Image (tube, helix red, strand yellow):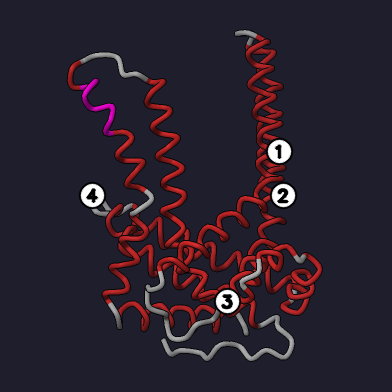
Amino acid sequence: MDIGKLLENSFGYAKEGLLGNIGTWIILIILAILPGIPIMLSFLTLIPSLMTGTMPDFGAFIGIFIVAVIAAIFLSAFYQGYQMKILRGEVPLPAVSGYGKLFSDGIKYLIITFIYAIPVLIILAVTIGGAIMTAVSAGPNFEDILPIIGAVILGVIIALIVGFIIGLFAVIGLIRFARSGRMGDAFSFGAIKDTIGRIGWGHYILSLIVVGVIVVIVSIVFGVIPYIGWLLNLIIAPFIAVFYSRYLSLLYDSGQEGVVAAPETGA
């Protein structure tokens, strides 16, 4: 399936599924908001100190913030779990139901994503962590710090390149997990490479770049609207997520031998 048809089908799928069922759209907005609630509440703990003009207990705040981040990660599982339904190729857009299953799939999704991110995290930890330690020992001498800044920039560039390459495998790996329900399938690199080969490496990479650019541009266009940009981005977030997940699902199906792609929906 060419990129134009991927985009057309994915847009039609999201439009029919969400505009035809506003209730699903509203629920997805709520699920998208959930992870931000504990983060917001953690910052609210600083308000009493700010109102009284006293110094906040930053040690306690850091502890509260860490707990809030962990809670946010768990709450995000429902939203990610729903994306798994779309990646399975369910047509039409499935209802938001079976929250236990959504949570379970979402947690597994996050675990798989974290495992794939480990090499990038290691690169960043070694380069940035090492640079910070070196900078502390170097003192305020600017000439000694310049090479450290260069090392950090180089480390970030390497991390981006490695992250992009890993991401090519992670996308197919996550869809394989969504289809089979087995986490091990997300790391069957030989099968993943074969699937990408059937899609065509050039076509696969170009397809991901195109959809990525579209998502970024749409988010920026809505986000720069004065005063209400943040609200508009929040409202369209489920539409973008459904569109993106459907796009990846169809792209995956195009590389399956003997598998008929999910039925197309009209725009």
Sequence-wise, the earlier of marks 4 and 1 is 1
Label 4 sits on a secondary structure element that is loop
Indicate the amino acid at tag 2.
Answer: Val
Disc nearest the viewer among 4 and 1? 1
Q: Which residue is drawn at 76% across and 66% down?
A: 188
Nearer to the camera, 105 or 220: 105
Q: Distance between the residues labelled 2 and 1?
A: 9 Å
Tell me if residue 47 comes above or below residue 101 in the rendering: above
Label 2 sits on a secondary structure element that is helix
Give the number of the disc on residue 123.
1
Label 1 packing within 10 angstroms: few (<14), some (14-19), many (20+): some
Label 2 packing within 10 angstroms: few (<14), some (14-19), many (20+): some
Instruction: Say whether marks 4 and 2 touch (CB < 8 Å).
Output: no
Give the number of the disc on residue 249.
3
Residue 58 lies in quadrant: top left
Q: Distance between the residues labelled 3 and 2?
A: 24 Å
Indicate the amino acid at tag 4.
Answer: Tyr
Indicate the amino acid at tag 1.
Answer: Ile
Tell me if residue 74 comes above or below residue 206 in the rendering: above
Label 4 packing within 10 angstroms: few (<14), some (14-19), many (20+): few
Q: Which residue is drawn at 42% across and 81% down?
A: 93
Disc nearest the viewer among 3 and 2? 3
Label 1 sits on a secondary structure element that is helix
Residue wearing tag 2? 162
Q: Which residue is drawn at 42% across and 47% down?
A: 72
Q: Position of residue 65 (x, y in %)?
A: 40, 33
The residue range painted magenta reads 44-50
